[in-house]
Image (cartoon, helix red, strand yellow):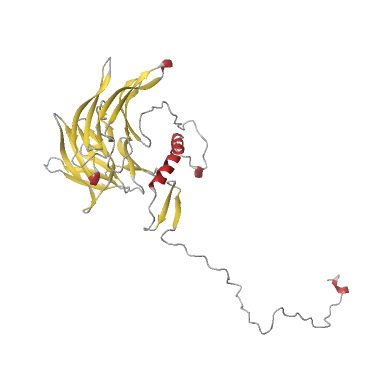
Amino acid sequence: MDELSEHTFALNSVIEFKATHEDDKQLNLTDKTTSTDPMRPKADASSSFNEWCNRGTQTVGIRANSNQTIIDERQLATWLRKILPNVERELLKGCTPDFQSGNTNKTNNDLEIQPYQKLSLETLENSQGIAIWLSVQTNNAPVLVISTIFPHDEDWCEHVEQNLLLFVPKREQNNLIAWRETKRVPIKACLRSLCTNPYSKCMFAGSTMDGDIYIWNYEQNVKSSGISELYHNPLLHGYAIAIDWTNEHTLLTAHSGGHVAQWRLGAELTMEAEFSLRLTPNSPIDITCLIALSYNEFVVGCNDGSILQCWISNSTAVKRHLETLQMKKHVFSTSSLLKANFKGYTILISCDLSGEVFIHDLRNSHD
């Protein structure tokens, strides 16, 4: 203020600012709180969608209106073939580390999955493989049975000539074990399911796309090894989506429409019982996988993520009564079921297509 005290401020005259517009011209006044920009065009609700991401399942979904345009299956198939090599490489790397936990350092207990041997099969493009392990033969290495599923439209298989390939482990140079093809068994159509008998690992069952079930036996002697057909029966409800053994001489087959059949091996392969599973009286379930817990108890996984525990409450009656219990449901389709023993009791492990895993405690599950 001391510096300004030497100056004197005075208004000697009125300063006029002349208008830049004519007085008789009307102006449109605009409020500063509003905008004069044109509104954005509204998006068509029938084609708009929002992407959402779930960190838990690491999947991306699309929420769209029911009037969504038809998907081009050819472009989808081209995209799937493009990403398949990257997906296979990611699967070989093992589980994805949890970066949110802050512990990304590897330890000595971490498992690393590495390819041991690559088997090349004569097949068409986009074919799928199906394989099982049989009994152990050489240096704790089991026998391998492989077949291929050619591309088909929905439930119709166009390729009726197919083979079961038997790969037996052989000791090579430097004491390495390698699987070599030793036998081919022709079958009428592509296999839909294949399962080893865990009570007799030389025996295995399979169902073809034309709706038949086969029981084979692996035979080995000093000179050669091969596969013999024990049983061959048509199935009432079409091909078996899943197969599992309840004991050495009985097995279960799961079919579309929620049908489950129990079979017994004897002089002939005969169906002992048949069950129809439904969540409600008018809604049959779509079974994707099956596992037997005992002779009178099994679990099925469904396309909508449901898991049903089933047991026969009256096995002595002519018409057996089946009771069901719905277990914790997955978000996506149930892809696989496993059973394990933990501290003396049986637990069930379920997995869906997103990789979400549930561990179910089966103790007192019937109560």
* Residue at image coords 42%, 42%: 78
Query: Is 23 on the left or on the right of 242, as rendered?
Result: right
Residue 127 drawn at (x, y percent) = 35, 36
Which one is in front, 84 or 153? Answer: 153
Report the quarter where the N terminus lies: bottom right
Which one is in front, 215 or 245? Answer: 215
* Residue at image coords 63%, 79%: 27
In the picture shown, does residue 267 fall above or below 30? above
Quarter-wise, where is residue 133 in the image?
top left
Quarter-wise, where is residue 211 in the image?
top left
Which one is in front, 219 or 245? Answer: 219
Query: Is 110 on the left or on the right of 271, as rendered?
Result: right
Residue 178 drawn at (x, y percent) = 38, 21
Query: Is 272 on the left or on the right of 327, as rendered?
Result: left
In the picture shown, does residue 168 fall above or below 80? above
Residue at the farthest bottom position: 24
| Number of residue marks | 0
Residue 358 drawn at (x, y percent) = 36, 43
In the picture shown, does residue 86 fall above or below 56? above
